[in-house]
Image (cartoon, coloured by chain):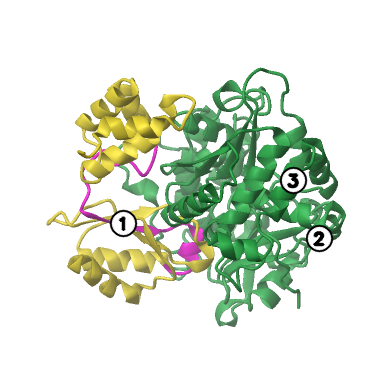
Amino acid sequence: MSAPSFAEEVREIAAQYPQSRSAVLPALRLAQERHGGWLPPAAFEEVGEALGLTPAYCLSVASFYDMFHLEPVGRHLVEVCTNICCGLEGAQGVLEAFERELGVAPGETTEDGSVTLRAVECLGGCGWATIVAIDDRQRRAVKAADVPALVEELRGA
Amino acid sequence: MPELHQLVLAGADERDLTRIDEYRAVGGYAQLERARGLEPQAILDQLQASNLRGRGGAFFPTGRKASFLAKGTGKPTYLVVNADESEPGTFKDHEILLRVPHRLIEGCLVTAHAIGSQNVFVYLRGEYLDCFEVLRAALEEVHAAALLRGVTIVVHRGAGAYICGEELALLESLEGKRGQPRSKPPFPAVTGLYAAPTLINNVETIATVPKILELGAAEFAALGTPDSTGTRVFCLSGNVVGGGNYELPMGITIRELIYDVGGGMAEGRPLKAVIPGGSSFPILTADEIDTPLSYDALAKVGTFLGSGVVIAIDDRCCMVQLGLRVAQFYMHESCGKCTPCREGTRWMVQLLRKIEAGEASQGELDLLLSVCDRILGKCLCPLGDAAAMPIASYVDKFRAEFQAHLDEGGCPFAGESSLEDLFAPVDQHTQQPVAVGVST
């Protein structure tokens, strides 16, 4: 049996909801995974097609949410929380260490396309500051001194 | 020293309660069996008698909220669990979901029985991938154990938007739209998800429900204080030795939480201020930390218990920089629907930048307070208030420090503040509308 198509997968998700439009966030997430971590215009056509929505509607939803990327991103995503609790515990130092090690500013992707660095709002780990999410896996109590090893790990991954 | 008193997190220190057999070994799902033998109203009566109040921040009595659900509408009744924990300073639901997922599921099934619902949706914040995996595995176990009895529990992942923790924005998002709040009335109890009667409760609230049945409402209500019954998973963070979640009876003081439970301030530094409730709420000075963590006691000092947060801030923190970073958060998260919030948060950021740089006039400090006034109570949802209340309180409680920025033409911390140059995500967006210049 062949793997289910994108539209089949989306319709299976949609069947969990009384109204199929509810599946637009999971469908966009799935499309993003399939398109290398971001949502090109074709993704909105695919999601729209599967759910009976216009591509423009799908874009309007995607653009509201932080976890959907409307521009290409690196193969890995490094996100440093710089909200107040992490900030009080040295998040700026952690962010700057990533900037140095990766050679990019927050919001940018390394030239080889391997890593995108972002500063993000609270990740819900305030008592375990500083929180860094690497490809959505949260690391707790990250210090600036830990950053070179984390980047090394990423380069090897 | 105040003793931990675990209800929601009970047993999780000793056992791996993410596994259904371990959870059953500590009495798990026994209350579900019992509840299913009871009349729904009997469970709602227990909730009312326990005086359980919402742990998400609004503190509304849970039993009363359930009693508002419209009946005989011919539509299904939905139970929605708000697991979109995003209030800065809050990370308790994160721990509850990771460590006691079955207690949440049991709470869902008991509550669903009590309100006659067959459909439960857990709106989980998108960033909690770890919780999603734990919850999914737990639900598979529950399914295999045939405990659902026709009830469906769908875990719906958000995609990164603070506003979706607001219940009406959450419903919009769950319906597949941008997460912008609706006006109320109508309230969700009448016109909620898919325009059907809907009960929305926080993770901690729902996870407390099985314990209320186990203890009985009277024993639960004997914990804590008369207005704030039971326990709370307090979120302690900031410049403390032992940041973390601590479940304790409500009514312990802020001082006890920081110094006795949390091991005190890091490096023995002096405490300067405490943010209770979460970043949306008015700040307290170090002189006010003998205030008990209960709804009434915090109301007396002009602030809130919110989501059970205590952020301890030491003497190295510049209050203008704190205000700027908090305002940048709300500017980033404002959904843009209501003008006072959308525009006001931008004005706040711009004015606070000028104050921090020592370039603001006296009139601009007044203007900052005026902007706060013009947001407060003038928007559909509480996000605007959540920006205005804390900023106004920082100026109110630390006026001399704000004034020093004006008088000295710069920050008195001279580059040594703990929040110095803290980068905010709002500054990495290239498509943000540019705020208009503020002049006096």
**Which residues lie in the magenta part?**
A65-90
On what subunit does the disc labeled 1 rest? A
Please name which of the two marks, 3 or 2, marks the residue nearer to the observer: 3
Any part of residue A54 in sight: yes
Please name which of the two marks, 1 or 3, marks the residue nearer to the observer: 3
Residue picked out by circle 2:
B224
The chain painted green is B
Dot 1: what SS?
loop
Dot 2: what SS?
loop
Image quarter of the N terminus of chain B? bottom right
Residue at the image point whose x is 24% and y is 26% from the top: A45
- Colour in which the image shows chain A: yellow
Residue at the image point whose x is 25% and y is 28% from the top: A46
Q: Position of residue B63 (x, y in %)?
A: 77, 40
Q: Amino acid at mark 2?
A: Gly
Q: Position of residue B52 (x, y in %)?
A: 77, 48
Q: Amino acid at mark 1?
A: Asp
Verify CB contact (< 8 Å) between mark 1 and mark 3: no
Q: Amino acid at mark 3?
A: Ala
Dot 3: what SS?
helix
Residue picked out by circle 3:
B35
Instruction: First in sequence, mark 3 or 2: give its number.
Output: 3
- Is B3 positioned to the left or the right of B319 in the image? right
Residue at the image point whose x is 52% and y is 62% from the top: A126
Residue picked out by circle 1:
A135
